[in-house]
Amino acid sequence: MRQTSRFRRRATRGIADTSSASAVEFALVAPVFLFLIFATLEVGFVMYLRSAVEAATQNAARMAITGDTYGNKGDREALIKQYLENKLSNILFSSTKYTIQTEVYDSIANLGGAGLSQAGMSPMAGATTS
């Protein structure tokens, strides 16, 4: 009887030992979990940048349309570019990674320019011209 119980204890000793099982489970789950955490942070950061750039662009367009350059005198286009550069540099952009392009139209009739008129379309509401 003693022989059987001693043999049984030795045989089941490895089954009852689960100390390394949690380490193996952690090694399998941790990379996936960390990937999901960092992917979530990255997506959130990209959404923040997109929103910040859109807000800066909208404010610059508002300044260009209304002519309100906050009391500063001088070239409106240069002031708007300076405003954009200040806003974009505050949200982790270096000026070598983007370009600012502006177009100035004499009147709203010229909006859309030559590309539409060459295609036989009016710049206003996409109507065709005859």
Image (spheres, grey):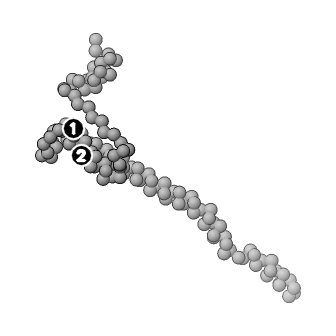
Give residue 107's quadrant in the image. Answer: top left
Specify the label residue 77 is tagged with.
Answer: 1
User: Looking at the image, is mark 2 or mark 1 earlier in the sequence?
Assistant: 1
**Quarter that holds the N terminus:** bottom right
Question: What mark, if any, has residue 59 been given in the picture?
Answer: none
Q: Which mark is residue 83?
A: 2
Identify the residue shown where x is 74% and y is 74%.
15
- Distance, label 2 to label 1, CA atoms, is 10 Å
Where is residue 125 drawn, in percent x and y? 27, 24
Amino acid found under the numbered disc labelled 2:
Tyr
Which corner quadrant of the image does residue 106 belong to? top left
For the residue pair 55 and 100, the one nearer the viewer reads as: 100
Residue 127 place in picture, x, y as percent = 29, 19
Residue 57, given in percent of the width and then of the height, sits at: 28, 42
Most extreme residue toward the front is 96
Q: Quadrant of residue 99?
A: top left
What residue type is disc 1 on? Glu
